[in-house]
Image: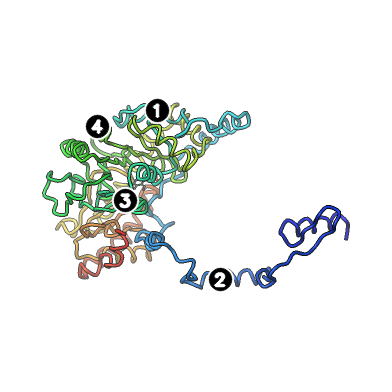
Amino acid sequence: VSRTTMVGIFEQLKAEGFVVSGHGSGTYVCRINVEQVAIDLSIQNISAHVSNLQSSTPLPGELKLSTRGTYLDQAPLNRYGKGQPFSPGNKDDGLFPLNLWTRLQQRHLRAVKSGGLQARERGGLLALRNAIAEYLRVARGVRCEPEQVIITQGTNLSLDLVTRLLCDAGDCAWVESPCYWPAAFICSANGLALHPVDVDEEGMAPPGYSAVSSMPTDPSPRLVYLTPSHQFPLGGVMPIGRRMAWLDFARQRDCMLVEDDYDSEYRFSGAPIPSLQGLDTHGRVIYLGTFSKTLFAGIRIAFAVVPQTLVRSFSEAASYLYHDGDLVQQAVLADFIRDGHYAAHLRRTRVVYGERRTALTSALQRMLPDAFNDGRIRFSGAEAGVHLTMLLPIDVDDVAIAKAAGVAGVTAIPLSAYCIGQPRSGLVFSYAATPPQEIQMLAQRLGETIRTALTKKTSANSVKLSPKEKKANLI
Ligand SMILES: Cc1ncc(COP(=O)(O)O)c(C=O)c1O
């Protein structure tokens, strides 16, 4: 064995703490508890060890999950298929102008070498905040200056920031029911008490505005989570009167409205719905937006538009908590928006997704003509977004249909999984990634599954979340 090999071996043993050496005094073996390190690192042994770990649930006592961890682990939506057609978050990545993006990216990567992309501004790259502010003013009627736009790596993180900065543990958050599940989870995870408010076809109403039975009036919320332009997942559009009533409510009760404007770029009929934030004259709305619906889910660029008085706190906290995100992608996106490519991409995808939505609605109507005609089933909400919600009679087991659909190779999320207030039955399909021919074929399978379920209705109680799941939903 050569000297170099031996020196290498000793260096390695020293680095791993098996031997120590002092200058001029030789090398000595360390005192080690042999049993702790006597692991046979042969391939067979490693795989046996791994499968042992996997099969040894529950975890050893000291590795127990927290209450929040258990809640997340058992989250109803974790059970429904990923990777199948109509799965949430699926978008047609083939429509994305990859060559153009790559060219822009190369240009900005070169700037990294000259130090041109070092994090300087807290809250995200100023060029992107400029581009987003300009876009929001024109396209969404949002009133904002670039510094009010705080870049995050997703709506979850935007909401995380909002709840951490504005709420204390034990404060109350009013959330829609049905609700975008991660929004409710993040409020819970940050210690807020959830008060679900059942929505109607115009979204969530403030107290006294409509006779919604489960409307809480106490405790006062610190934060109200709303999707006013396209309620998720029912698709209702909140009318102007209700919007103004929420703004009055927020002022009177000293709370913040969080407007999640996640998919307003895709409206297939009627004029665009301007934002709630644009009506606010008292700094009571935090507006959340994302690029994961319009570009691709993996881009992980989203933003919160905060009132001027909160700009410093939000931009500094975002920077401390999550750093400033991927500045290369932010620079690329800034060019992409500023040079008109984003608007062009939206125009193109709006047409394609609109055709796919029509393909799905007409195929399902063809498959289930009687149930549509006699009103047992119907589509919910405005013609917008990249998901379609179908309402079922309350005594139809949407969970069972979703499971059967999963077995047939197509994902349908049961509406009941999103409900933390009054139970409802229905199915949610995310259709944007699926071409029309495939939609026809999948709608056929769905149609057969739904028809079978409609003919053998089960009791409403057996279909909803168990009391344990319900409690977990509201930790
Ligand atoms: C209501 C709602 N908000 C936000 C998002 C997007 O979240 P993110 O920015 O983390 O991708 C989605 C995506 O499905 C959504 O349905």
- In this rendering, would 14 be left or right of 37? right
Neighbour tally class for label 2: few under 14, some 14-19, many 20 plus, Cα within 10 Å: few
- The quadrant holding residue 131 is top left
**Gap in Å between the C-alphas at discs 3 and 4?**
23 Å
If you read the primary sequence from the N terminus, does the residue marked by circle 1 or circle 3 appear first?
1
What secondary structure is found at the residue carrying circle 2?
A: helix
**Are the residues tagged 4 and 2 within 8 Å (C-beta)?**
no
Q: CA distance from mark 1 to mark 3?
A: 28 Å
Does 38 sit left or right of 155 as displayed? right
Q: Position of residue 411 (x, y in %)?
A: 36, 58
Secondary structure of the residue carrying numbered label 4: loop
Q: Circle 4 sits on which residue?
A: 280
Crowding near the residue tagged with mark 1, few <14, some 14–19, many ≥20 C-alpha atoms within 10 Å: some
Q: Tell me which residue sits at (61%, 69%) in the image.
A: 47
Q: Amino acid at mark 1?
A: Pro
Residue annotated with mark 3? 180
Residue at the disc numbered 2: 51
Judge depth for marks 4 and 2 and give the one in front.
4
Q: Does the beta carbon of the residue at mark 4 sit less than 8 Å from ligand 1?
A: no
- For marks 4 and 2, give the CA distance: 56 Å
Residue 314 percent location from the top left of the image: 40, 36
